[in-house]
Image (cartoon, helix red, strand yellow):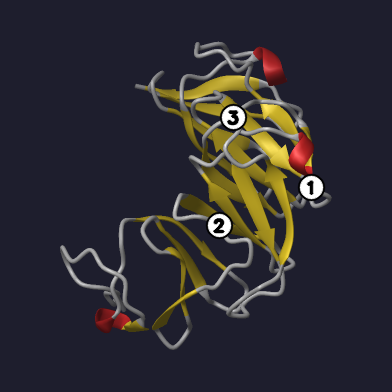
């Protein structure tokens, strides 16, 4: 059964049931264990669709800006919101409350960089997508202008998993490998293999849990 939320070609903000709701440009999606759907709405922040099909707008303390373009939910119910252009990630707890508390932030608002570290000691450069890896408990994030795939551990530490940071095409190990605008990464939950869409190289790269990168599919 398929249902439409919002209205065709109408760019607005309104909470409500299914077609009575209105969205701005929508980007990331995530679903929690209670079947609440979280939508990154570029104009209006994080929207929530409940199991009974009602759309509401979250109130986020210290809030994610309207540049929160990607979202993920951890196994424990924490909400990750990536501020793509403001260069940081907000981590919230106790979902699906309407106004969850801010647990911590990673990165520095308005400051781009590629430094690994814990919470605000780390720097980001244009986070593009999230994938929650339940095998490790890490959030896997792609950084498309930073040309890296990085992992955020539950204790707030960010570490580069794959990518040299140089826009190139190199199948190697870990930070010796190179991508050209990595767009999305998913991790196989049956073995921990990662798959990266390497946009400008026109390839899907495959990465072992140890970080060995090979070309899996090439156009």
Indicate the position of residue 4 as horizontal and vertical percent values.
26, 74
As drawn, which residue projects farthest toward the left? 9
Looking at the image, residue 162 sits to the left or right of residue 56; the answer is right
The quadrant in which residue 39 appears is bottom left
Badge 1 or badge 2: first in the primary sequence? 2
Residue beneath label 3, please?
Answer: 112
**Labels 1 and 3 touching (C-beta < 8 A):** no
For this rendering, which residue is in front, 175 or 116?
Answer: 116
- Say whether residue 187 is visible: no
Determine the residue positioned at 69% across, 18% down: 175
Specify the quadrant that holds the C terminus. top left
Please rate how many residues cluster around mark 1, counting C-alpha atoms within 10 Å: few if below 14, some from 14 to 19, many from 20. Answer: many
| Distance between mark 1 and mark 2 Cα atoms | 17 Å
As helix, strand or loop, the secondary structure at mark 3 comes to loop
Numbered badge on residue 156: 1
Real-space Cα separation, disc 2 to disc 3, in angstroms: 17 Å
- In this image, 160 relative to 169: left or right? right
The numbered mark at residue 190 is: none
Report, in whole angstroms, how far the alpha carbon at label 1 lies from the one at label 3: 18 Å
- Dot 2, crowdedness within 10 Å: few (<14), some or many (≥20)? many
For marks 1 and 2, give the one nearer the viewer: 2
Quadrant of image for the N terminus: bottom left
Q: Quadrant of residue 117?
A: top right
Q: Residue at x 70, y 21 (%)?
A: 174
Percent position (x, y) of residue 141?
60, 40
Quick one: label 3, few (<14), some, or many (20+) residues within 10 Å?
some
Q: Left or right: 70 with respect to 10?
A: right
Which residue corresponds to mark 2? 64
When the figure is inspected, residue 201 is found, relative to residue 36, above or below; the finding is above
> Picture coordinates of residue 172 (x, y %)?
65, 13
**Mark 1 or 3 closer to N-term?**
3
């Amino acid at each position: 059964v398929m249902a439409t939320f919002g209205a065709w070609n109408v760019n607005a903000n309104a909470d409500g049931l299914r077609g009575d709701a209105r969205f701005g440009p929508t980007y990331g999606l995530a679903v929690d264990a209670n079947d609440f759907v979280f939508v990154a709405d570029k104009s209006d922040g994080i929207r929530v669709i409940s199991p009974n099909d009602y759309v509401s707008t979250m109130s986020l303390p210290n809030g994610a800006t309207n540049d929160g373009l990607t979202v993920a939910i951890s196994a424990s119910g924490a909400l990750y919101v990536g501020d793509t252009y403001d260069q940081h990630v907000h981590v919230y707890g106790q979902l699906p409350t309407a106004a969850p508390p801010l647990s911590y932030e990673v990165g520095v608002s308005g400051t781009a960089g590629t430094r690994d570290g814990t919470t605000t000691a780390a720097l980001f450069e244009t986070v593009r997508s999230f994938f929650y890896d339940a095998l490790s408990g890490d959030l896997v994030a792609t950084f498309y202008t930073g040309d890296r795939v990085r992992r955020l551990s539950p204790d707030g530490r960010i570490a580069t998993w794959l990518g040299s940071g140089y826009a190139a095409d190199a199948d190697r190990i870990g930070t010796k490998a190179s991508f050209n605008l990595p767009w999305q990464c998913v991790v196989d939950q049956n073995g921990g293999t990662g798959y990266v869409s390497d946009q400008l190289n026109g390839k899907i790269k495959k990465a072992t849990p140890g970080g060995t990168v090979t070309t899996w599919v090439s156009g």
